Amino acid sequence: MSRAEAEKIPIDDVDRLAQIVDRLRTKSLRITSTRRALLSALVGSKRHMSASDLAAAVQAAQPDVHLSTVYRSLEILEQAGLVDHVHLGHGRAIYHLSDELHQHLVCESCGTVIEVPDEDLSNLASTLDRRYGFAIRPHHFAVLGRCAECR
Amino acid sequence: MSRAEAEKIPIDDVDRLAQIVDRLRTKSLRITSTRRALLSALVGSKRHMSASDLAAAVQAAQPDVHLSTVYRSLEILEQAGLVDHVHLGHGRAIYHLSDELHQHLVCESCGTVIEVPDEDLSNLASTLDRRYGFAIRPHHFAVLGRCAECR
DNA sequence: ATCTTTGCAAACTTTTTGCACCAAT
DNA sequence: ATTGGTGCAAAAAGTTTGCAAAGAT
C-alpha cells in the first residue's frame, strides 16, 4: 500500500491544536481535557479515524474516557463546525477536522480510502444543482467502488 | 390492508414477477414461498424499501417470515444479481430490483429520496476512472445533500 | 434422500440516552 | 454557584450467525 502517500506534512501540530482550542473558547464551549485529547488525536491522526479509533487514541493518554463521551464530544465539535464525519457505507463513519476538505473514494474490495480534491466532484455538484436544485454535501458521503489494484 | 386490496396486483407486475422467478430457476436457486413473496414485495413497491419494510410487506401475506430470513434472502438474491442495495448514510440501507437502475439523492433535512438517471453520474465516473483508475459503483451509495425545497 | 432454506434466539456493531456525579467557568 | 460535561450501564437500531427443524428438488 505504498501508493497515494500524498500526506501533507503537518506545519505544527501544537500550534494547530492551540488554534482549534481557541475556537472552542471563542464559541464559549468548555475546554475539557477530553476535548483537548480528542482534538489532539484528530490533529495528529494520519489515518481515517472512526469513533472507536479516536476513543482508543484518547484512552492512550486518559484511560477512563468513555466511548460515549467521544461520541458526545464529536457531536458538539461538529455542531461548532470544527469536525465533520463521513459515511463510508456499511454503517461505518469516520471523523476529521473540518479544515481537511477532501472527498473520499472507498474501495469495497480492499477497504482502501483514497482522498481526492473537491474539484473532482465540482462538476457533479453543479449538474445536480442545475438539474434538480439539489445541493450536495460532498464531504458527508463516500464514493464507493473498486480501486485500480482491485479491478 | 384488506384482503381485496392485497390481491390487486397489476398484471404487468405479475409478468415481471414470473420473469424474475424464472431467473431464480435458471440459476438453480430454490423457489420458496418466502422468496416469491419478497420478490413480489420488491416488484410491487413504490417506495424505497428497507429490510424491515420488506419484512413487513412479506409478513402481510406470511406472518411467520422472520426478519433474519429476509436478510438472508436478500443476500442470496443480491449474489444472484437480482437485487441491489444502496446505503443512504446513517446506517440505513434500501433494496430494489437490479433492473431498476438509478442514482439516489438523499435530502438530509427532510429525508426525501430523489431518483436520478445514471447519466447524471457518468461524468463523475469517467473522471475518477481517468484520474485514479477508480471504478465507482454508483448504485451502491447515495449522494447526500439538501433538496430544492429545504434549501 | 439430499441438500438448502427457514424460524428462532442470541450475538454483534455502531450509536444514543438516562442519570447521578464531577468539573469548568 | 451554576451550568455543562463525563462515566457508566443500558437501550436502540441494523445486521449477522448457530442450530435444529422444515421444505424444495
Image (cartoon, coloured by chain):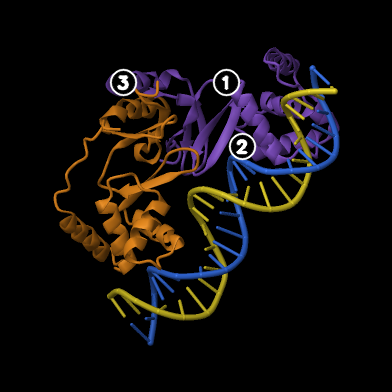
Chain colours: A orange, B purple, C yellow, D blue
Q: Nearer the viewer, residue B35 or A80?
A: B35
* Residue B127, numbered label: 3
The CA span between labels 3 and 1 is 24 Å
Q: Amino acid at mark 2?
A: Ser
Asked if badges 3 and 2 are on one and the same chain, I answer: yes
Can you tell which of label 3 and label 1 is closer to the viewer? 3
User: Residue A65 vs residue B111: left or right?
Assistant: left
Residue A90 locus on image (x, y percent): 50, 39
Mark 3 belongs to which amino acid?
Thr
CB-based contact (under 8 Å), mark 3 and mark 1: no
Q: Position of residue A107 (x, y in %)?
A: 40, 30
SS label for mark 3: helix
Is D11 situated above or below B13? below
- A82 to B143, vertically: above or below: below
B121 sits to left or right of B112: left
Q: Amino acid at mark 1?
A: Glu
Q: Earlier in the sequence, mark 1 or mark 2?
A: 2
Q: Residue at x 25, y 53 (%)?
A: A43
